[in-house]
Amino acid sequence: MSLLPSDHHRPGMRQTQGFLLVDDHALIRDGMSLAIRQLQPEAHLVEADSCAQAVRALQSDGQNIDVVLLDLDLPDSHGLDTLQRVRAACTTQRVAIFTGHCDGQLALACIHHGAVCFIPKLAGVADFQAGLHAVLGGRLYLPPALLAAASAAAQGQESPAPAPTPSSQPAPQLSPRQHEVLALLLRGCTNQAIAQALNISPDTAKMHVSAILRAHQVATRTQLVLRYAAGSHSGPAIAAEPRAHPAP
């Protein structure tokens, strides 16, 4: 089956964000399209009803796609394998999970594998709108109860702690380059993708990531992402893609 474009390709530079909607139910895709159109009437929308279609869309139209809204269970792929396959086809696109699962461990695993948002389909309209607003604003999002469960899982706790309360603490002092790396890291980009986006070597990207983790006093990327999702730090918006330029 071919890709399912929701609108015509617009020539020239895009003034609004582009979205790839990946779900095997047309009704769900229609609902996502409607919600996005209410916020960005001119958004560039592309639909796919399988993982293979999503990968092809990213390969053929990736330059016009900023956000992927992804169901984990598709006819040709299930669970984390879906995210991994789509994430592997992404460069700096943000991946938001919109799925029938409601599991803190799964949400944590998705964050670990590069997702920036996890919204259960049973969460309701308010949570979907909150997640969509966050993604459009370049922020990270998990519903409060799920964030608590994922944070507890990340800390190795057996039961969820109370949902973290945003404290709006300033982020640690970072260099301009480290801010660029952090923005891409919070998109879920790998070291290789960060290196390509900023025109630096993978080893240099790895060095910057390690310095960023130390500055935030966390051991893993996942813990860093959850900290920003909880609002513990006011950090860089991740909507704008850093432009590649020569390494210092």
Image: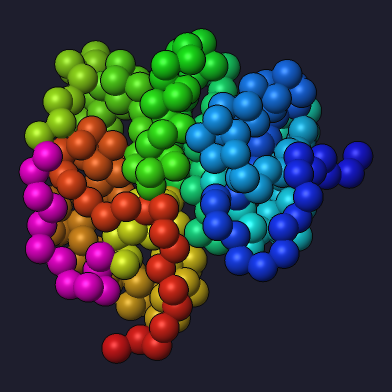
Q: Position of residue 79 (x, y in %)?
A: 60, 29
Residue at the (68%, 43%) spot, across then down:
45
Total numbered badges shown on the rendered structure: 0
Q: How is the image coloured?
A: rainbow
The answer to whether residue 172 is magenta is yes
Q: Is residue 144 left or right of residue 132?
A: left
**Residue 73 appears in the figure:** no
**Image position of 218 with respect to 103: above or below:** below
Residue at the (35%, 86%) spot, across then down:
247
**Residue 175 appears in the figure:** yes
Instruction: Work out which quarter of the rendered image holds the N terminus and state it.
Output: top right
**Image position of 147 with respect to 8: above or below:** above
Query: Quarter of the image holding residue 2?
Result: top right
- Near-viewer residue (96 or 114): 96
Q: Is residue 110 left or right of residue 14?
A: left
Q: Position of residue 6 (x, y in %)?
A: 76, 40
Q: Which residues are magenta?
A: 168-179
- Near-viewer residue (38 or 120): 38
Query: Quarter of the image holding residue 168?
Result: top left
Q: Position of residue 234 (x, y in %)?
A: 18, 47
Residue at the (69%, 27%) spot, across then down:
29
